[in-house]
Amino acid sequence: MILFIKKYRHLLAILSIAAQGLIYMLIAAHLGQNSVPVPVNTWIDEHIPYISWFVISYVAWMPALYVSFIYMGLTDRALYWRTILVYNAAVTVSNIIFIMFPTFMPRPEISGSDLFTWLVQFIYSNDNPVNCFPSIHCLTSYLLLITMNRHKLFSVGLRIVFSAFFWSIIASTVFIKQHALVDVVGGIVLAEITYRIFYFIEGKRRQVVPKEQSNVGVPSNS
């Protein structure tokens, strides 16, 4: 048991997902006390239809998030740590935006007795329509999507399947009216920028280390 814990203790970093979620909920609970949230919907969102069955993709997001990080933690520890760091950096920036620029998404009145409608109503009643820009669903789904594809974690066929799955999560945010289109764009752009900045710094760091190692044992001119 002790050996098992030592071998897989790096997976404890996944608990940062829960920690970030707690921060998100605390911000949502106190939002509006000192400021008025700004609506994020535009005329474009009025033309996007409400499609209840997309709620299945929406609720699949959290399990997919945990499973993806566990998989990386078990198969590629270096990539796991890099992705965890990018995730936390991007979500921390999002939380700062939620505080500095509070937003909300007006929701439609929905009715029905089918499972999809019940799930949407459950989400509406348990998740306040605030902290919209950028969308965390879109940010994290896009981050996992580009990580999977750019690092070729699976075969081409599986990458196509999983890409379709992550894009369906992104699409679900607007089809069940949890987010506006601008939230989707904001989440994707923030994920891409954070990813590129991190790997740019990582690349620079890797260039510096070999130079320092090559200079070891070289006598100075003094």
Image (tube, rainbow, N blue to C red):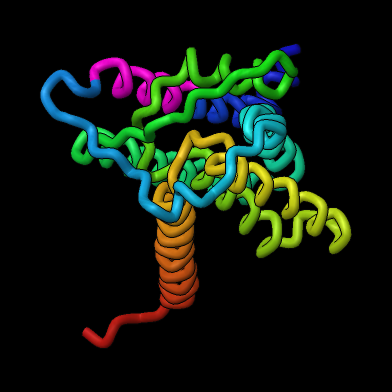
Work out whether residue 141 or residue 184 is closer to the camera in this orientation and state it.
184
| Residue at 58% across, 44% down | 49
Rendered position, 165 above or below 113? below
- For the N terminus, the image quarter is top right
- For the C terminus, the image quarter is bottom left
Please state the horizontal and vertical placement of residue 112, each as a whole percent of the image: 66, 18
Please state the horizontal and vertical placement of residue 184, each as a whole percent of the image: 47, 50
Residue 61 position by quadrant: top right
Could one spot residue 145 in this view of the protein? yes
Asked if residue 17 is among those painted magenta in the image, a careful observer would answer no
Work out whether residue 40 or residue 95 is closer to the camera in this orientation and state it.
40
Asked if residue 28 is among those painted magenta in the image, a careful observer would answer yes
Q: Main secondary structure of the magenta part?
A: helix
First to last magenta residue range? 18-30
Please state the horizontal and vertical placement of residue 2, each as a whole percent of the image: 71, 14
| Residue at 36% across, 23% down | 23
Rendered position, 70 above or below 113? below
Horizontal arrangement in the rendering, residue 221 relative to residue 212 (left or right)? left
Horizontal arrangement in the rendering, residue 24 relative to residue 168 (left or right)? left
Number of numbered callouts drawn: 0
